[in-house]
Amino acid sequence: MSQPGGPLSQLRRGHEELVLGLLRKHGPLSRGELGRRCGLSRTTLYDILAELVAAGAVVTASRPEAPRGRGRPAETLTLNPEAGQAIGIDFARRGLHVAAVNLAHEIIGSASEPHDADLPWEQRVELAGRLVGSLTGGTLNLGALNAIGVGVVGPVGDPGGDSGGDPGGDSGGDSGGDSGGDSGGDSGGDSGDDPGDGSGDGSGQGTDGAHPAQVLLRERFGVPVLLDNNTRLAALGEAIWGAAAGVRDVLYLRLSHGVGGGLVVGGSLHRGAYGLSGEFGHITVDQDGARCDCGGAGCLETVASIRAVLDAYRAARGPAVHAAGVPELAKAAGEGDAAALAVLDRVGARVGGVLAALCNAIGPSVIVVGGELAETGTALTGPIERALRAHVMPVSRHRVSLRRATLGEVAGALGGIALVLHESPLLSRYPAGPDLPEEPR
């Protein structure tokens, strides 16, 4: 008998994950179909399936249409939707977003609620617990996953692990989520008036070096908490379920209270050596420009964040639009307001120039733009695309595709779920969470 955690146990877990991964990807399959796809011996496969059925992770069913001729309808196996849920939580700067899926990858539901940027972590986690309860009927069943995936604002030193995070000192290009009904969320490096990561209570890291969200969620739910930067998780969500599903080379940009993004390179989510990949908001676009919260000057975030764009619009229109927000700006642009269109044209030109430089360096086939500012529509994405086409290398000019994000404000929470499932090829080079099996190579 193999020892728990020993080589044979790890091999068996790898086989189980292989079978579960095939059922996630392809839906109901017969034993024969599973055998052809997984490459395991008949004896090994049947042993694995027997254990998964006994554990309730897999159920059997008959195909609705039996083949012609004699014999019983072919029996199929599928993931048991009732076996448990995977939960993702996005702790945005000014809002909280939660999503839940069952093990068949069917979205059970999602929920969002805005809050003040200085809301203490204890209250944020309490709110998260209420939202999770509303999605799961008050009974959270994580099944064999036994973990929760969480996105936070700021750099994360150990993505995918049950430690790390940098709740103090937001670097700027990270997502959050202003859940005021706009899609895209809040990219962490707010050039507004929120200090640090918006945690409000100044708690910094926990006593064990973990992010306060991890500490409090572990206490509440009693399971490991896998944590990463929430803009990077939003990129992961869009690359798995959203606008760039199935694309191997993706550049994701979020334009919100801050500016940030994520990269999928060669089919893998890229995080960089120190968890700083995707800090596109801190690319310099004007060396004589305004000071940025990161300590630099003239960063893209100083001209393309929500605050910067609205300040420019208010300056152009005067006191009459002092209280204008992104919805009002979008409405004005849609109605042909010259000031709104001019502001968005200038911002789009800056953003498109940065995207062109990134394209020349990285070579994505798809660029996904999200965040509240993307809700201004073609008034912004049009200038972005024109600048992109003008400055990208000619060979890429008509090949790279610019798309609007489709998952809205729950993209980061869905990315957190992907982190827990750890079954996507996008995570093949990602650190596995504690006590979670790595995906079989």
Image (tube, rainbow, N blue to C red):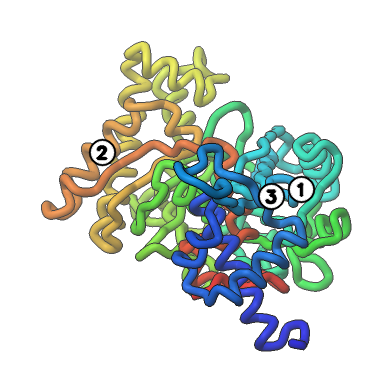
Frontmost of labels 1 and 3 is 3
Side of 135 relative to 235 (left or right): right
Identify which residue is drawn at 71% across, 72% down.
Answer: 434
Give the labeled residue for mark 1: 200
Alpha carbon distance from label 1 to label 3: 41 Å
What residue sits 33% from the left and 26% below the top?
379
Q: CA distance from mark 3 to mark 2?
A: 44 Å
Q: Which residue is mark 2?
A: 385
- Residue kind at label 2, given as amino acid type: Glu
Q: Earlier in the sequence, mark 3 or mark 2?
A: 3
Kindly report which numbered mark, 3 or 2, lies closer to the viewer in this rendering.
3
Amino acid type of the residue that numbered disc 1 sits on in the rendered structure: Gly
The residue where tag 3 is placed is 80
The crowding category of the residue bearing disc 3, from other C-alpha atoms within 10 Å (few below 14, some 14 to 19, many at least 20), is some
Secondary structure beneath label 1: loop
Mark 2: few/some/many CA within 10 Å (<14, 14-19, 20+): many
Q: Quadrant of residue 215?
A: bottom right
Classify mark 2: helix, strand or loop.
Answer: helix
Query: Is residue 188 visible from the viewing direction of this image?
Result: no
* Depth order, front residue of 28/202: 28
Q: Which residue is located at x 66 percent, y 51 percent? A: 60
Other residues around mark 1 within 10 Å, as few (<14) / some (14–19) / many (≥20): some
